[in-house]
């Protein structure tokens, strides 16, 4: 029987069976792959009763796999509390945003800390870094952009050395107040330049900054100076984004994947709910695409959910 295919339009995939070769003991919050094929997986360790951990303080692990899914290394320790967002640059440096520690950490490929932004276990002052940051990525010029999404609706820009340069965005943390079952005291930010959970930030090859404004069901586009340029409405609660070699942005959300050109034009959507290989049991939360088109999708909401798709 021929292998079942997934995807949309010219983007067709087959899921890699029996991958990874090890059980992921916890929530695979995000995934990235360096130029040598090392697959980094940010894992939220299970709670004492075995149930999945979420965005609050806890413990975590960074797994390092090879492309075949074999375990090569595991980084642990108090540098991880609630792993949330990962990203690898071309120098094989790994950026990790931790919602439990309120920090962004840059590692080398051996797990050595090269740079740490924020104060571990301490929230920044209102409007300042960080309050449960969701993801950190570098611009082509080396500057670091951080979406500071759960505790405050902001995006921060740093130099490559970690010097704070700029903050933009508005909106009260209404999503987090509801999630934490606290009184809702704020007002949802819905206007241009306002956010309702900036869950990811990405910088395109042209220097435009794309913010996944998840609970507003849209992506907002800015200059690197924080000036609002455009809004893409109707993007399905985007959790993470990746711009491929063709200049197409892939986003993941609970229903699956969504593809758009960098002018916001919809290319297509794909994804099925279910427990079978190639289906998504919970909520796709992180993704990575290798130069050959190989796709990795990490899911939250349950333990041991990470899949690899080969483009065909």
Image (cartoon, grey):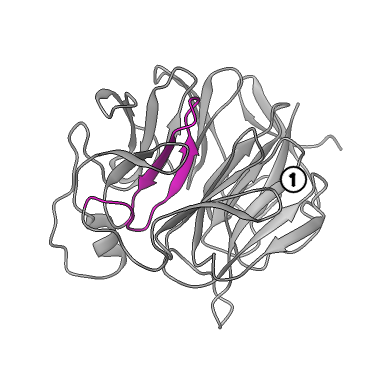
Residue named by callout 1 = 38
Viewer-closest of 303 and 230: 230
Q: Which residues are magenta?
A: 127-150
Viewer-closest of 234 and 69: 69
Which residue, as the protein is rendered here, is positioned at the far right? Answer: 1
Q: Position of residue 280 (x, y in %)?
A: 59, 50
Q: Is residue 252 left or right of residue 50?
A: left
Q: Quadrant of residue 50?
A: bottom right
Which residue, as the protein is rendered here, is positioned at the far bottom? Answer: 49
Quadrant where the N terminus is found in the figure: top right
Secondary structure predominantly adopted by residues drawn in magenta:
loop
The 10 Å Cα crowd at callout 1, few under 14, some 14 to 19, many 20 or more, is: many
Quadrant where the C terminus is found in the figure: top right
Q: Position of residue 79 (x, y in %)?
A: 54, 65
What residue is at 18 percent from the left and 48 percent from the top?
A: 188
* Residue 301 lies within the magenta run: no
What residue is at 39 percent from the left and 68 percent from the top?
A: 121
């Amino acid at each position: 029987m021929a292998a079942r295919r997934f995807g949309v339009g010219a983007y067709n995939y087959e899921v890699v069976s029996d991958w990874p070769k090890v059980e992921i003991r916890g929530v695979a919050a995000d995934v990235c792959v360096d130029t040598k094929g090392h697959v980094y997986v940010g894992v939220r360790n299970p709670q004492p009763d075995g149930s999945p951990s979420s965005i609050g303080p806890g413990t975590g692990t960074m797994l390092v796999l090879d492309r075949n899914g074999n375990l090569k290394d595991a980084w642990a320790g108090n540098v991880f509390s609630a792993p949330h967002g990962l990203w690898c640059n071309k120098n094989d440096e790994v950026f990790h945003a931790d919602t439990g520690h309120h920090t962004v950490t840059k590692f080398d490929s051996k797990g050595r800390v090269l740079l740490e932004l924020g104060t571990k276990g301490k929230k920044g002052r209102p409007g300042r870094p960080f309050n449960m940051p969701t993801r950190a990525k570098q611009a082509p010029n080396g500057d670091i952009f951080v979406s500071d999404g759960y505790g405050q609706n902001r995006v921060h820009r740093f130099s490559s050395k970690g010097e704070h340069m700029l903050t933009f965005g508005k909106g009260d943390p209404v999503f987090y107040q509801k999630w934490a079952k606290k009184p809702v005291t704020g007002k949802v930010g819905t206007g241009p330049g306002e956010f309702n959970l900036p869950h990811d930030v990405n910088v395109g090859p042209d220097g435009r900054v794309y913010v996944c404004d998840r609970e507003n069901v849209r992506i907002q586009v800015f200059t690197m100076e924080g000036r609002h340029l455009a809004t893409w409405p109707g993007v399905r609660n985007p959790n993470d984004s990746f711009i491929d070699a063709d200049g197409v942005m892939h986003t993941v959300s609970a229903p699956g994947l969504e593809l758009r050109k960098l002018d916001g034009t919809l290319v297509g959507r794909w994804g099925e709910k279910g427990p079978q290989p190639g289906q998504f049991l919970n909520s796709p939360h992180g993704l990575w695409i290798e130069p050959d088109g190989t796709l990795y999708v990490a899911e939250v909401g349950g333990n041991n959910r990470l899949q690899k798709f080969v483009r065909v």
